[in-house]
Image (cartoon, helix red, strand yellow):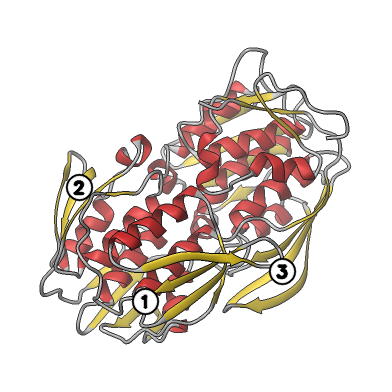
């Protein structure tokens, strides 16, 4: 356990580049391992989740190695792929730690290989259901043995003769969509996924970048993605932008701590990932976008957040797919806003690293913020000023969830009293060095009992 406390801070100032995008980092490694030749990756997120994916791919026969870093200190990586369908059966169990993305996408990648693989993870990952990927992958010919509720540990037996499917997602999910597309790589014929609402399209973009035939069209029931199986993917350079989900923590801190003015550089602005930024602007945020450009097939820009008087709004359900990971930090912004913010369509939060919907509601109530919660919605009543924070001696239960941990540390920076989280260890899964990153902007985040140095 690693308790951390965020103390009310003075103005946050400065420019910084957040870590590489986690979603793109996972996909870059997996698709590089499925390509022929070398894939060079710049700016890879070197958090525990992504490093776990790299280790799993090594066990599946790919060469994955760090070869240095660029001028900004970001990791430079090299993947020598095995080609479509070329992964080998691992000698050992694949332990995927805390990463649901690793678990669901790798299961998809392996499902069309004739191999048997045992998979597990930490206590949090073992609680997360895998049924939403097991069901379509079983239709493609894979078979699974899992604990009750389709939970890990599980045994995957990949399909010797995989078959293409046409699959309509019951719930919009980029992870489930991507798992099917990855399975389709080694499946003859055309596999089609229909999503009811558009979700992040990093997989589609990167598949095309490496040579796959991926076609996207509007269907009567939603967005249709079709991929032709058995392509010859060719290794190519991939530049990973800064993660908008990670940038969100510093940006919301900038909006809610009086006098703040912070800029996040090189942030990915994929159109299907920026729902939070549109929502914050609707709430009255002074959030500016500058130097919009394209790098590695993804739009990137600099984002500047200045302290703002926010107002409560209703966030409709159709916005959820473009900001599903950002609702915990949006709830923190809502705690500072004047009036009620109602967030709808949040069922997906129930099956993240924790039941994030319940965890957010529980944490806000403990910090003195009035909330109401339903099965798939949350209302936060802001007062237009700083939330109370925690009583001395109490802490927020993070449920081993990195986004819950970081969100409530940001809450503490703008609250009237400090906010302590029970365990910040899992922050490193997605944002290694988070406390130091925020500290460089002027935030006061310390381990329990640690004394802040003068001028720090």
Say which label, 2 or 3, has the lower sequence index: 2
- Looking at this view, name the residue that lies furthest to the front: 67
Residue 247 in which image quadrant:
bottom right
Q: Nearer the viewer, residue 185 or 69?
A: 69
What separation in Å lies between label 2 and label 1 (alpha carbons)?
Answer: 30 Å
What separation in Å lies between label 2 and label 3 (alpha carbons)?
Answer: 41 Å
Looking at the rendered structure, the secondary structure element under dot 3 is strand
- Does residue 177 appear to the left or right of 270 in the view shown? left
Say which label, 1 or 3, has the lower sequence index: 1
- Does residue 411 appear to the left or right of 185 in the view shown? right
Residue 16 in which image quadrant:
bottom right
What separation in Å lies between label 1 and label 3 (alpha carbons)?
Answer: 29 Å
- Looking at this view, name the residue that lies furthest to the top: 393
Q: Quadrant of the C terminus?
A: top right
> Which residue position is annotated with label 1?
224
The residue sitting at 10% across, 71% down in the picture is 160
> In this picture, is 225 found above or below 130?
below
Instruction: Please tell me how crowded label 3 is: few (under 14), some (14-19), or many (20+) other residues with Cα within 10 Å.
Output: many
Q: Point out the frontmost of discs 2 and 3.
A: 2
Residue 323: x percent and y percent? 55, 55
- Does residue 104 appear to the left or right of 345 in the view shown? left
Instruction: Please tell me how crowded label 1 is: few (under 14), some (14-19), or many (20+) other residues with Cα within 10 Å.
Output: many
> In this picture, is 153 found above or below 453?
below
> Which residue position is annotated with label 3?
301
Q: Point out the frontmost of discs 1 and 3.
A: 3
Residue 104: x percent and y percent? 32, 56
Residue 328: x percent and y percent? 57, 42
Instruction: Please tell me how crowded label 2 is: few (under 14), some (14-19), or many (20+) other residues with Cα within 10 Å.
Output: some
> Which residue position is annotated with label 2?
154
């Amino acid at each position: 356990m690693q308790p951390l406390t965020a103390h009310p801070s003075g103005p946050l100032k400065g420019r910084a580049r957040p870590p590489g995008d986690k979603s793109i980092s996972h996909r870059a490694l997996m698709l590089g391992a499925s390509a022929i030749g070398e894939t060079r990756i710049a700016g890879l997120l070197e958090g525990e989740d992504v490093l776990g994916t790299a280790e799993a791919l090594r066990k599946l026969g790919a060469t994955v190695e760090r070869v240095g870093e660029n001028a900004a200190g970001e990791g430079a990586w090299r993947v020598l792929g095995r080609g479509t369908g070329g992964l080998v059966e691992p000698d050992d169990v694949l332990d995927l730690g805390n990463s649901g993305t690793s678990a669901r996408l790798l299961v998809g990648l392996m499902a069309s290989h004739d191999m048997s693989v045992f998979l597990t993870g930490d206590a949090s990952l073992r609680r997360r259901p895998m049924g939403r990927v097991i069901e379509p992958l079983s239709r493609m010919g894979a078979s699974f043995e899992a604990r009750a509720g389709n939970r890990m540990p599980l045994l995957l037996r990949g399909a010797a003769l995989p078959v293409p499917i046409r699959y309509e997602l019951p719930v919009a999910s980029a992870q489930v969509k991507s798992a099917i597309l990855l399975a389709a790589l080694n499946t003859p014929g055309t596999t089609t996924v229909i999503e009811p609402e558009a979700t992040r399209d990093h997989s589609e973009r990167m598949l095309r970048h490496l040579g796959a035939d991926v076609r996207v069209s509007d269907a009567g029931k939603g967005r249709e993605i079709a991929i032709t199986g058995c392509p010859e993917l060719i290794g190519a350079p991939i530049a990973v932008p800064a993660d908008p989900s990670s940038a969100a923590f510093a940006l919301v801190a900038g909006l809610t701590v009086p006098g703040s003015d912070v800029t996040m550089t090189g942030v990915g602005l994929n159109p299907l990932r920026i729902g939070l930024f549109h929502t914050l602007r609707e709430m009255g945020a002074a959030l500016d976008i500058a130097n919009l450009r394209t790098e590695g097939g993804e739009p990137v820009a600099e984002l500047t957040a200045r302290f703002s008087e926010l107002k409560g709004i209703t966030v409709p359900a159709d916005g959820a797919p473009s900001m599903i990971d950002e609702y915990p930090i949006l709830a923190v912004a809502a705690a500072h806003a004047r009036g009620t913010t109602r967030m709808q369509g949040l069922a997906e939060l129930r099956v993240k690293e924790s039941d994030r919907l319940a965890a957010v509601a529980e944490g806000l109530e403990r910090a003195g913020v009035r909330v109401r919660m339903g099965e798939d919605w949350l209302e936060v009543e802001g007062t237009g000023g700083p939330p109370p924070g925690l009583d001395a001696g109490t802490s927020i239960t993070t449920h081993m969830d990195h986004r819950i941990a970081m969100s409530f540390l940001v809450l503490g920076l703008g609250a009237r009293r400090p906010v302590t989280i029970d365990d910040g260890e899992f922050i490193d899964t997605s944002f290694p060095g988070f406390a130091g990153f925020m500290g460089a902007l002027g935030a006061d985040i310390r381990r329990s009992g640690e004394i802040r140095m003068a001028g720090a």
